[in-house]
Image (cartoon, rainbow, N blue to C red):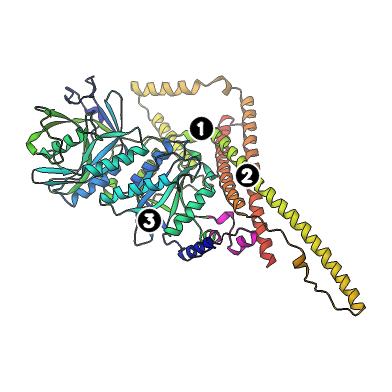
Amino acid sequence: MVKKHVLTENRKAYQAPTATKIDVESSALLSLIRHTSENYPSLFSGALLGFEDDNGSLDITHAYPYPYPDQYEGGSLRSRSGAKYQQDILEALKKLGYGVEIQGYFQSTVSGNFVTSQLVDSLVQQQLANKNSFILIHNMASIGKELDIKALRLTENFVRAYLDGKWKSKDLEHHKLSFLNIFEEIPINVHNQRLVDLYMSNLENPKHTDDFEMLNLSANQNVTAQLLESLYSQIDSYNYDQTNYNYYQRLHQKEVSKILSWKHQRKVENMERAKIGEKELDPEEWRSVFKLPTEPSRYNNMLHSHAIDVLTDDILKKCDEELIKSFAIERKLAPEY
Amino acid sequence: MVSETSFMHIVRPNVASPANSSIASPCKVKIHASASFQILEIVSKQILTPDKRVIGTLLGYRSDDGTEYEVRDVFMVPSSETGDSIAIDDHAHKTLFQLYKKAHPKEHVLGWFDGSKTINADTALIHDFFSKGSDRAFPYPAIYLNAKYLTENNEVTTPEISTYVGAAVGKSGATSGKVGWNVSSSSYIFSPVPNEVMSGTASEKLALNALTDSQYSESPVTVSATATDLSFLSSQIKSVTKTIDNLLYYINNASSSDSDIDLLRLLSNNLLDRPQYLTDLKELESHFRVHNQDVVMIEYLTKAVKEQIELIARLTASSEADRK
């Protein structure tokens, strides 16, 4: 009862986000990329600090990683030590005269593995506390070759369903929710301060020579193997959840057929009774006799589906790249073909 | 920025510090791109208060022999100058450093930076603060980084980052360890040391390249790659093609100078000198075919999984919608 009360209160507190884009200061972005990529394959998360400006964008000026690596994605976001650390940082920065607040988080991950219930839980809490909260996901599947960072927040559909706390297919349909719209992406802009711009344009050779690591044939081999590994384990979890659901479906089927035969029997009975002029029995009585099994929650199914979706996208991309490279090289080797 | 090669280390400044490197080799400062941006962001406040110095702490690694420094992060330290004394917020410095240390246990305070136009008596005072005491550069010598971007008339020019080590002049120990100093108590000679901007990981380089590209175009920089987007690959391939074109152009217009002939020789040697397995085209072809088939197989199966998952979700949704 108490919990329900809290939930209804939270529901009132949910406000649709107003921020339409995120401006990240180049220094903050670079230092966060450095921290996450240096510590790869350890996972790291941290707080993003900045302020909200008047024309609907969030300006992120500082990024501070949490002191310890994460066991799994979203692990530190609700930990007490993480919360304390970010609070201390915030206070220290405020003493320096910075008008910043905590605006969001970042999390390093490999492909779709970031979709954990811990991460989602803490993101819901954050979005209820601050409507414009978001999480910056640094996908390190292409580390050393390509940069993949995106800013995500939970959709309104998801948060409303989460607050209802019911995850049956009916509820998902009611909220128009599927694994495809758990998250929505917010565009990121990188912003340079004028002085930084001036400095950069005067550097002698600002551009690093491109690393063509990405163009090596089979450069993705290890990553693809790792992604497939993750995909297997996600499919395993998905199947585990699916067996529960299949059990429910069988049970449901059985009960439904029982009800049908009962209904049929009652119909025949009533016809006979009508013949001998007796009063008809209630044809709806089956509702009290039979009880349909309750559908298990589809929540985990949805999270796993989303993870699988992101993973497959990444794997397909790796395969496409590999094929392009492979065909290009093959052509050059054998010009007669 | 002063390039490294333009330095002639005639006499290494005699930096008096207990853990100073014994070898009289030149010392070098590497600044991470992110740190240099942060420094500029912090000192940009200098223009608002031209008379008040904006200072901060440099954090990072130093090599074991104390000859190489790597500036990885910085933070601002509040300070106020009143007449001929200067007060540095020791507490703020300590708190931020302790917090930073938690997440980066192997990093130390390396020194400090400011954005002032000149080196004067106050510079020595602040240097003294960062050279001594716990939670500062002690027992190693502190480095001083100056990001100058204001001219004498307080006009903004291109920022110039220079680094120095300070050598104490006169009797050591004359300074008191309190927060307020007297100007006459300590003096330093600041000798410039070379510095360079660097970026550590490949990901950082990629981000930096994207940022420099944006200098010449008006479109905002974004760093999110959508999963199906192969634009990065194509841009890389384009860049390789361009390099080859440049090379071809150069070869066609090559002179008969020694260096050019050496280059041509190198190129032709490289082209002729190919591994044995590259000569058997048939064998190679079959390898490629097998490889491509493997990749296509992975792609096919993955695609099947993806479609299946989507199909389940859509079927569930539509059956629920029908039930209403």
Same chain shared by disc 2 and disc 1: yes
Q: Is residue A149 above or below residue B315?
A: above
Q: Is residue A216 above or below residue B221?
A: above
Q: Amino acid at mark 3?
A: Leu
Q: Amino acid at mark 2?
A: Ser
Q: CA distance from mark 3 to mark 1?
A: 38 Å
Seen from this angle, which residue lies furthest front? A1
Depth check, front residue: A260 or B165: A260
Residue B140 image offset from top left, x and y in percent: 24, 28
Query: Which mark is drawn over residue A58?
Result: 3
Q: CA distance from mark 2 to mark 1?
A: 34 Å
Question: Tag 1 or tag 2, which sits nearer the N-term?
Answer: 1
Q: From where the camera sits, is residue B256 visible?
A: no
Please tell me which residue is depicted at 77% across the width and 71% down the height of the picture. Answer: A284
Which element is circle 2 on? helix
Label 3 neighbour load within 10 Å: few <14, some 14-19, many 20+: many
Q: Nearer the viewer, mark 3 or mark 1?
A: 3
Residue A202 image offset from top left, x and y in percent: 27, 41
Q: Is residue B81 left or right of residue A145?
A: left
User: Where is mark 1, residue-wise?
Assistant: A216
Same chain shared by disc 3 and disc 1: yes
Query: Which mark is drawn over residue A237?
Result: 2
Q: Which residues are magenta?
A: A161-182
